Image (cartoon, rainbow, N blue to C red):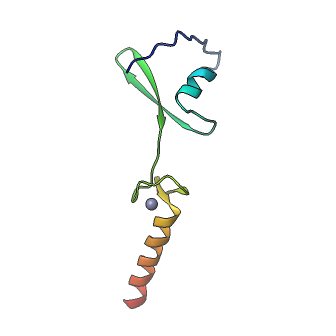
Amino acid sequence: MKVTAGLVREIDATGRLVLPSEMRHLCNIKPGDIIEFLIDGDKLILSKKEYGCLFCGGSAGLTMFRGRHVCQGCLAIAAAEVKGRTKGG
Ligand SMILES: [Zn+2]
């Protein structure tokens, strides 16, 4: 779906661009969200990046572990499994 809202903004001297509030609202973009930049030919595409847990895909309680997103629940399960292996030998 291609939507043209006719909104234009100027990039400032340091390369910053403010996303118009109408676009943020339409795309459900909130402060703290991660935006991914993609290039398609001569077009620059901004995409809201949705992260999920590496193991379960959940988005609650995410933390970074060795460069990957993992939820607290899966971290606890992994820690318990590792602990069980080292206990019994
Ligand atoms: Zn998980």
On-image quarter of the N terminus:
top left
Residue at x 47%, y 74% (from the top left corner):
79
Q: Is residue 29 visible?
A: yes
Residue at x 50%, y 66% (from the top left corner):
73
Q: Is residue 39 above or below residue 57?
A: above
Observer-nearest residue: 20 or 15?
Answer: 20
Query: Is 7 positioned to the left or the right of 86 in the image?
Result: right
Residue 60 x, y percent position in the rendering: 53, 55
Q: Quadrant of ligand 1?
A: bottom left
Residue 59 x, y percent position in the rendering: 49, 52
Q: Is residue 64 above or below residue 86?
A: above
Residue at x 61%, y 35% (from the top left corner):
30
Residue 89 x, y percent position in the rendering: 36, 89
Q: Is residue 16 visible?
A: no
Q: Is residue 73 above or below residue 2?
A: below
Residue 16 x, y percent position in the rendering: 62, 22
